[in-house]
Amino acid sequence: AYAAKIDVTWSYGANNMNVTNEYFESVAAVNKKMDRSEVGSHIWIKLEENFSTMSEGLRLPANKTVEIDLNGHTLGRDLKQPVKNGYVIEVGKNTKLTIKGGAPLSNGHVMWEGMTRTMGTTNGGVITAGYSKNSSGGIQALRGSRITLSNVTIAGCATTTYGGGIRADGSNITITMNNASVKGCLAGQDGGG
């Protein structure tokens, strides 16, 4: 049996009527697949386990509809120093993103700069430990993106610039939070949350 870590389904073909599914072992492999032109306008991603030490952030292409089910798991970078593009998720221009946390967690803990921080009760899945010197440490939202977070906690993310947890970088960005929170995020210039 294949040890699935990230389950990705996407539409393709004429009018996006066909759907296919593939399992990936890393976020880098998912990014490589999403960069290919045959991926249609809808992408569904479901975590099957924690991804807390990603080598790169999840880059969602422009002009897509993406649904991520954290399935009660953690999506994070575990960065101890700021790096270029240190975000956990970048939402492409005019992309509609929905993130569902999944099963509720309790007594959440987040590692950041070598210290464990207790975040108390967390909602569903957790986005954590991005640390950027040019973007958000958590979610980087580009122009025209529409984001809905449900039962999600963004915690322990940081940036040396603006928007430790979430950064709206451009115009016409909508962010809706349903039973979601931003905790313990830091920004060097403005907007820790």
Image (cartoon, grey):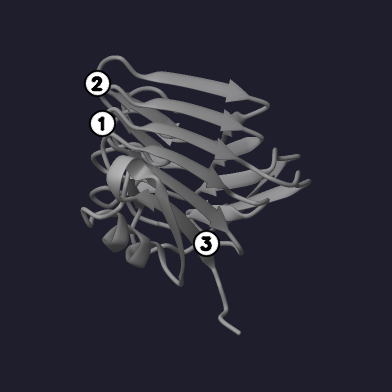
Viewer-nearest residue: 10 or 69: 10
Who's the residue at 64% across and 42% down the image?
A: 101
Q: Amino acid at mark 1?
A: Lys
Q: Nearer the viewer, mark 1 or mark 3?
A: 3
Tell me what residue is drawn at x 23 percent, y 39 percent.
Answer: 134
Direction from residue 127 to residue 26 in the image, left or right: left
- Name the secondary structure under disc 3: strand
Q: Are marks 2 and 1 in contact (CB under 8 Å)?
A: yes
Q: Earlier in the sequence, mark 3 or mark 2?
A: 3
Local secondary structure at mark 2: loop
Q: Position of residue 160 (x, y in %)?
A: 30, 37
Where in the figure is residue 9, as x and y percent of width and height? 46, 55
Look at the image and tell me in which quarter the N terminus lies: bottom right
- Closer to viewer: mark 3 or mark 2: 3
Q: Nearer the viewer, residue 122 or 148?
A: 148
Cβ atoms under marks 1 and 3 closer than 8 Å: no
Residue matched to label 3? 7
Residue at figure coordinates x 41%, y 40% from the top left: 158
Q: Which mark is residue 93?
A: 1
